[in-house]
Amino acid sequence: MAFSPVQLGAHGCLTALGDAAQTHAALLRGERALALVPVHGSAGGDPVPLALLPGRSLDETSPPSWLPGVKRLMRGCPEAPWGGARHPVFVTSSNFGVGNLYEFRRTALASHLAYGTPEACVAFVGRELGWGANVTIVSHACVSANVGLVLAARQIASGLADEALVFTFDFLSPFVAGGFHALKILNSEFPAPYQARATGSIGLGDGAAFAVLRRPGPGWIIAGQTLHNEMHHFTAFPPDGAGFMACIEPLVRLASGRRVWIKGHGTGTLESGRLEAEAFARAMPSSPLVGWKGSIGHTLGSNGLVELAVAVESLRSGRIPGTVGSAAPAFSGTVALEPIAGGSFDGVLCASNAFGGAHAALLLCHA
Amino acid sequence: MRPSSSAMPEAYVSYACTDDAGGEDPAATRARLRAGLSPGFSRRATVLGLLIGGVLRGAMEQCGGTTVYASAFGETRTLADFLDTFPHESPTLFQTSVHPSAVQQVMIERKLPIREYVPLAGGPCLAARALAAALLSPGDPVVFCGGEERGSWMADMGIASDRSFAFALVLRKDRDASTLARLRLEALDRDEGAQADGAPGGMAFPAWFDLLHARRSYDGPVSAEWRLGLEWM
């Protein structure tokens, strides 16, 4: 497999716990951002665990209530002619402005339509952030950010871009909460990733993040990225877990000789959590596995980049948050429930999954 | 500014299939494309899923490496139907309304995995962005497919496609006896690109489809950054 290694030149994220450093610190303290919220927002419904930005309602507004948070996040992005010919932008999401579409259907307020499609929503974000027209929109459910990172790395490697910006955002609404609630995996239980228990459950979270990719240089390097789509079932993996192995095998070889920990997907569903934990334990038995969605929730299409930003904080600080919200027994002996010292590690493998049996993974290490 | 050391990506089209369903009624599309499909799939699939399944029929075995998929709006009929189920949401409509389900519906029906599935959504230069993703992929072959389904009330509001269409191409790195066309992207200066299709946005996605459907060659800008050369043999 041909990799396109790139430098992770700058990065940042926004979760219900704050920026990357604040989120990392809160995870180390074992804080849980998830709280029970009516699934249909002000319209009521069953209480489900959601991690919303402080002060943000599940009901979307016009203009969207997440804009100030996005602007705050992107103040940390280096200045460059983003969206210009040599500085492409890759925008990824699984939600875009679907919360506004839901509100339009509910309230008939036409102003919501200005954000109701991926194209309209990204155009709005681009105008607010001053981007040019060189913007690619990626939408692959919960591996969207990972696919954006792959495409950005290829533009860098081809020599067609000097730098590439990957920006991802997913903000919750009754649309997505109601959808996962209908699938019965978003229920009144808080998620406990990788914990062997009677009932599985997930939590959802607001999230946004960015990464600036450059040609390989000093600092953090995304050494390799892999994708794999099982196409077995929309919401289930084959029982042998082969897709997890198919995705990570090239990265396991690439990581040979390094001490690597694993940031898994770990939403809190039982079968996929078990398959994931067992696959990682088999492929990398000396690498501890952690998952953070028991605290910040599943940030959907953005989770791959949101959690990458937190992983970089972990590597930088030498302290890796444990699997917040989970307790013994875990699905494998490699699951780290408590924070671990990261000083002896020189890399992290980050994995994500999505509808359709989609897998994505990347290996981040120091140059 | 033209980059000094960049690759000019190109590929050779070895398979091309298009379906211009236009304003066809969804029930008529379903009936027309039902042949060769399992009854369950033809009943469950979205209109876009059926259209994509139809154009991919002759390229199915080549999707396993890299498949680039483009749809500005995705499954808008299902999205609209899902919205109408609140407060008793349909799980099936939710999962099939999620972009990019059309290819997934087809591949899951056949249990055909894809190593790299690269789905792109809307944007004024969707065709150019998807072409760049396909031509920069190291995969060989690369399947490049896409399309739209005509929306229901969302089309009336201007937030869904007003026509249905689908296309599928198989792209190869090298020319051979099966070659139907050559595709080439060339970086161009921004002033030239700003005039693409008479607007800064570049070539509209339906216009790209129309080129393929008519087997019409083209040499001109498709976005502010790219000139497209499409030459049918």
Image (tube, coloured by chain):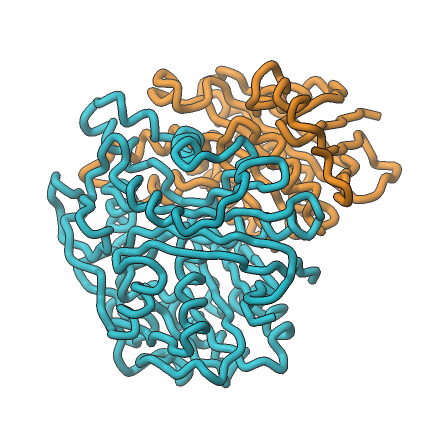
Chain colours: A cyan, B orange
Is there any visible trace of residue A282 in the rendered image? no
Residue drawn at the location 21% of the way across and 22% of the way down: A108
The answer to whether residue A97 is left or right of residue A62 is: right
**Which one is nearer the viewer's eye here, B227 or B231?**
B227
The image shows residue B184 at horizontal and vertical percentages of 76, 33
The answer to whether residue B13 is left or right of residue B206 is: right
The image shows residue B129 at horizontal and vertical percentages of 60, 35
The image shows residue B23 at horizontal and vertical percentages of 49, 15
Furthest residue to the front?
A79
Residue drawn at the location 13% of the way across and 46% of the way down: A45
Give the answer, above or below, for where A14 lies relative to A85.
below
Give the answer, above or below, for where B216 lies relative to A281.
above
The image shows residue B12 at horizontal and vertical percentages of 79, 37
**Which one is nearer the viewer's eye here, A118 or B154?**
A118
**Which one is nearer the viewer's eye here, B74 or B229?**
B229
* Quarter of the image that includes the C terminus of chain A: bottom right
Residue drawn at the location 47% of the way across and 64% of the way down: A351
Furthest residue to the right?
B177
Is there any visible trace of residue B2 in the rendered image? yes
- The image quarter containing residue A200 is bottom left
The answer to whether residue A55 is left or right of residue B44 is: left
